[in-house]
Structure formats: C-alpha cells, structure tokens
Amino acid sequence: MGIQAFAAFEARQELHSHSYEPDPLGPRDAEIEVSHCGVCHTDISLIDDQFFGLSSYPLVPGHEVVGKIVARGADVSNFEVGDRVGAGWLCGSCGECEACRSGEPNLCPGAQGICAGRPGGFAERVRVDSRFLAAIPAGLESEQAAPLMCAGLTVFTPLDELAVQPGTRIGVVGIGGLGHLALQFAKAFGCEVTALSGSPTKSEEAARLGADHFALTSDAEAVQRLASSFDVLLVTADGDLPWNLYLSLLRPKGTLWLLGMPQQPLAVESILLMLPSRSIKGSIIGSPDQMQRMLEFAAKHGVRAWTEPMPMSDVNTAIDRVRKGEVRYRMVLTAG
C-alpha cells in the first residue's frame, strides 16, 4: 500500500501531496505511523537544494519524527509493534568502520540521513532502521519530544561529551530553536548559564528557560565585559560572527563549540587559541546512545521544546513561518 506524504518536486518550491511505494520492509526496519514531526531549518535547506548536494526530487522532508511502530522486520528485537519511538536525522551507516564499531555511527563517513535520498517524516508513515530509533519516555509528550530528535540531540551532545558539571560556566549564543533547548539542558546539568542574543526581547524568555544572566550581543561593551568568563561557549547561531571576540570570552582551556553552520571559513587569531589553550570544536546531532540518554534526561529534568503545532496538511504555511523566523521556538506538524 502506498504511503501518503508531502514532497517538494523542485528546489525552492512549495510541497505537494505525494504518494510513493516504499521498498520492502527490511529485516531490521521498523515502520512508524507518524503522529508528530518537527520542521527544522535543515528541512528547508534540503527543499532548497542547499545542503551539501544531498537533495533529490521528489523530496519528502522531515527528520524529527515521533510515532508508533506499526510493523517491524524479522530481526527487530529492541522494539515491539505499538511502541512509541522517535527518529532523528541519522538512519543508517556502514556498520564496519571504526566510528560504527565504537558506537558512534553519526561519525561514519557513510552516515545516512532520513530525508536525504529517502523519504522523510512529512508523511503518514516512514520506515527507519530500528537501530537508529529511540524509545520516547512515558513522561514526555510527543509534541515536545519531536524537536528533541534533532535540535535537542544537537545541543545535548557537547554537554555530554564535555562532561559538564554543576558550576560549569556555559554561554549560549543565539536563543532560537537550538538555543532555547541549550539553555534548558545546561541549567538541568547544574551549570551557570548566560544567554547571548541579538534580540533584547528575549531577555525575559531566556530567564524562564534557565539563563542566570543575559547579554545583548549588539552591545559590544557588554560582551567585552564577559572576557574570560566561560568554560564552554555553545554557538547555535549560523551567521558569521566576530570569532576573535567570542574566543576571548573563554577561560583558559575553554571550548567554543559550533552548533550552527557559519557560511564563511572561520578566521581567528592563533594566539587566542594557543596562549590560553582554548579549543574550537563542532558537531551535528549525536549517536543513538546519546539520543536515548538525551530523551531520558529531558523527561527527568523537565526539558521541553517550546512548540507551535500545525496540522500536516498546512505544511507550506508552517515552512513559510519557519523561513521568516516567526516561530518561538519550534514548529511541529501533527497527523490528521
């Protein structure tokens, strides 16, 4: 039976109803009846053919999927039909390289995206290798869980890998779809959290999200007063920023971690790295194990995406509002 979906048939065009016949259910595959799917800026980049040449048409976007398993392959042993699960960007890897063998298939050179070259979650159903699914904890509503599958995992991963502790001084640059979750996760880890935003209207919301302090990035003097303040600076903004200034905000051995994607190469003064032994890192998403830990951590500590739901049938309206930056902070498409 065909799967009903919404697809882009050309770059930078609206999505239209689309029906496709899925490949046979593989032995490790699970078929998910989609109840919720987040709208991520990466979906829009794929629609516009601006994401590393991964787009092919017709393209069914959607990689922040939550729903129930309605069918499973013969070798699926970790989930049952009826289980509520989540799927993020990662849906396949080679299984043989060093990264895969060490439990980090997200670092596999052959890692595959759920809506890059295969249909995604803007659909009634989607099929995913069950090894890349996560169980949604009972205390986490599906609408809030969907954005965690990509945005939540993206900001959780550096905090997890850096093993931040209570009292770690964290700065979050950019309070949007990623940043509003980064504030919550950092606070739940017990960190001292500062929000840095170009929008003065976000000061109050940042405090509600867990920020202990707020700095307006357009106020150069205020930013400069934060010199040597942070152990970790999470940069969720994707613009080209004053990188030397932001490096100077780190304490010795501090880390500037890129989570947004700058459009231009980073130009930094080497002395700002070498003398205080600072570092620059970056990542996208995380491993399946991190995804499961992230969901359980979010459920336990009350980390929730701030969402705006919209019926899947209104997908083009949802995409347009995300394009215009009108959503605070994550748009979620719902079945029905």
Image (cartoon, grey):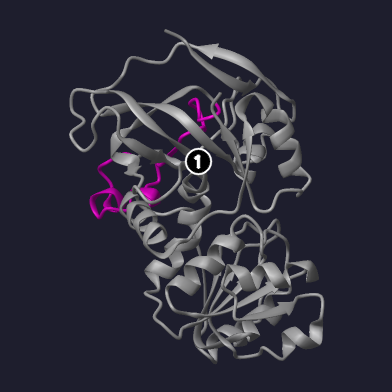
Residue 2 falls inside the magenta stretch: no
The amino acid type, in three-letter code, at marker 1 is Glu
Q: Quadrant of residue 199?
A: bottom right
Q: Quadrant of the N terminus?
A: top left
Q: Quadrant of the C terminus?
A: top right
Q: Quadrant of residue 60?
A: top right
* Secondary structure that dominates the magenta span: loop
Which residue bears the numbered disc 1?
A: 64
Q: Position of residue 222 (x, y in %)?
A: 76, 86
Q: What residue occupies the far front of the structure in this picture?
A: 139
- Please give the range of residues in magenta: 94-122
Is residue 154 shown above or below 267? Answer: above
Going 46% across and 83% down the picture, which residue do you hit? Answer: 168
Going 42% across and 15% down the picture, which residue do you hit? Answer: 22
- In the depicted view, which residue is nearer to us: 189 or 110? 189
Going 70% across and 81% down the picture, which residue do you hit? Answer: 245
Residue 309 located left or right of residue 116: right
Q: Position of residue 90 (x, y in %)?
A: 42, 42
Residue 63 located left or right of residue 295: right
Residue 277 located left or right of residue 326: left
Residue 115 falls inside the magenta stretch: yes
Q: Position of residue 196 (x, y in %)?
A: 68, 74
Going 28% across and 47% down the picture, which residue do you hit? Answer: 97
Q: Residues within 10 Å of mark 1 (few under 14, many from 20)?
A: many
Q: Circle 1 — which element?
A: loop
Q: Position of residue 321 (x, y in %)?
A: 75, 41
